[in-house]
Image (tube, rainbow, N blue to C red):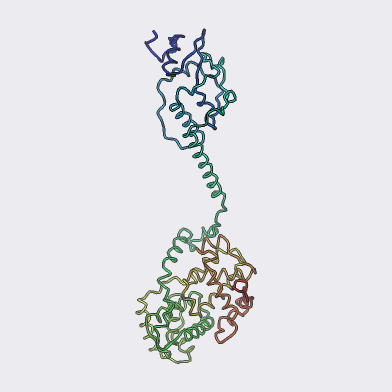
Amino acid sequence: MAGSDENNLGVIGPGNIQEGLRGRLGKFPVATGTNRRALSNINRNIIGGPPYPCAVNKRGLSEREAFCNKNPPIPVHRPLTRKYAAQLANKQQQQLEPEEIKKPVRPVPISSEPEDCNIIDVEDYKTSDDFSAPTFVQHTEAMLEEIDRMDEVEMEDVEEEPVLDIDGCDKRDPLAVVEYIDDLYNFYKKAERSGCVPPNYMAQQFDINDRMRGILIDWLIEVHYKFELMEETLYLTVNLIDRFLAVHPVVRKKLQLVGVTAMLLACKYEEVSVPVVEDLILISDKAYSRKEVLDMEKNMVNALQFNLSVPTPYVFMRRFLKASQCDRKQLELLAFFIIELCLVEYNMLKFPPSLLAAAAIYTAQCTLSGTKQWSKINEWYTGYSEQQLTECSRLMVNFHRIAGTGKLTGVHRKYSTSKLGYAAKNEPADFLLDPPF
């Protein structure tokens, strides 16, 4: 009957229990008693060695639990947690420890009745100082410490404040295209270089210079304001002028014609109601004929290869202003005042449109608050840190200081009106200059 069925508990007797223990425990001797068998030798390091003992199960160990599960469970790949690593260390130590290190401990009886079982308590087995932990156990401890450290770093990352969703209030507005707005501005950042010109292109011109360019743009800003055109029109006008002058030589007598024609093209692209050619001729004191304007228009669109869709600073200004957390109207007027001052300056062509827009908003925020203001939200949506804006911002502060002086005062007069909130009357942020004035 003993060899007929190992899984039949009804035929397991005291003798078979001893044989089962020998088959299960290998070299571990078994102490015999009247009705119970005890484990006489247990490797002391199995329970007391690792510094991270497994949780003690207070439920007794019956004969069914000890012997019926003949086939061991199939190993499964598990994530390396503290508990699993400690169990793995115990298993490796049981396989690698030499036999002479084994030390007998208190016998633990195995009973056929679960309620009559003694309980293994961790307090009964203390780690002795006579033996140091094996090398692989020390390696496991170091590995567990590294896991804990990584968990702490991950928790710090999770606790970071989330970036404010500035488009949440526009989700029901189909014109806001919230689903595509991030992709649009990622494309604008990549495409803005196509609309930029070499910062030293004026060296290729033989009859005009950067001072003449500044006079022309300062005059066009006043014309734009008088005609009450859209803001996009002004920025596109300046972009068309610079791109045309970068590839086509112009004599100074035709420079104003280039400016008037560029504004006509920008109006056709941006405006709903386009000024007629006669109005532009009249505003230029009838210096040119209608035919001259139309001929220059043909030359410009051919030189620019009909490419009028370029990201200007205005495109980025609207997006970056939305990410600001200040008084929107006051900040908007001051930022546009600052960036229009930059349109007149030739040396500001070295900055891409997105950086100009971000620096103008940064300078305006600092001007209104009296301290440096550039939040994580601003940095996230603009893509520029405060350090990257420092050089451009200092130039803007200097332009603000001298805006009402000299001959090029069109922008200052424009923003000194009540309609535009007297933005030019704000004191410049001299503390941004190095050294401050």
Query: Where is residue 114 drawn, in percent x and y?
Result: 54, 16
Please provide percent x and percent y for residue 223.
51, 83
- Quadrant where the N terminus is found in the figure: top left
Looking at the image, residue 15 lies above or below residue 280: above
Q: Quadrant of the C terminus?
A: bottom right
- What is the tally of numbered marks visible in this picture? 0
In the depicted structure, whether residue 54 falls above or below residue 275? above
Look at 41% across and 32% down and name the residue there: 76
Frontmost residue, 84 versus 97: 97
Spot occupied by residue 294 in the image (x, y as percentages of width and height): 38, 85
Residue plotted at (46% across, 37% down):
79
Q: Is residue 25 above or below residue 261?
A: above
**Res 96 quadrant in image:** top left
In this view of the protein, which residue sits in the foreground, 139 or 351?
139
Q: Is residue 97 above or below residue 267?
A: above
x and y percentages locating residue 205 in the rendered image:
40, 85
- Residue found at x 63% / y 67%: 371
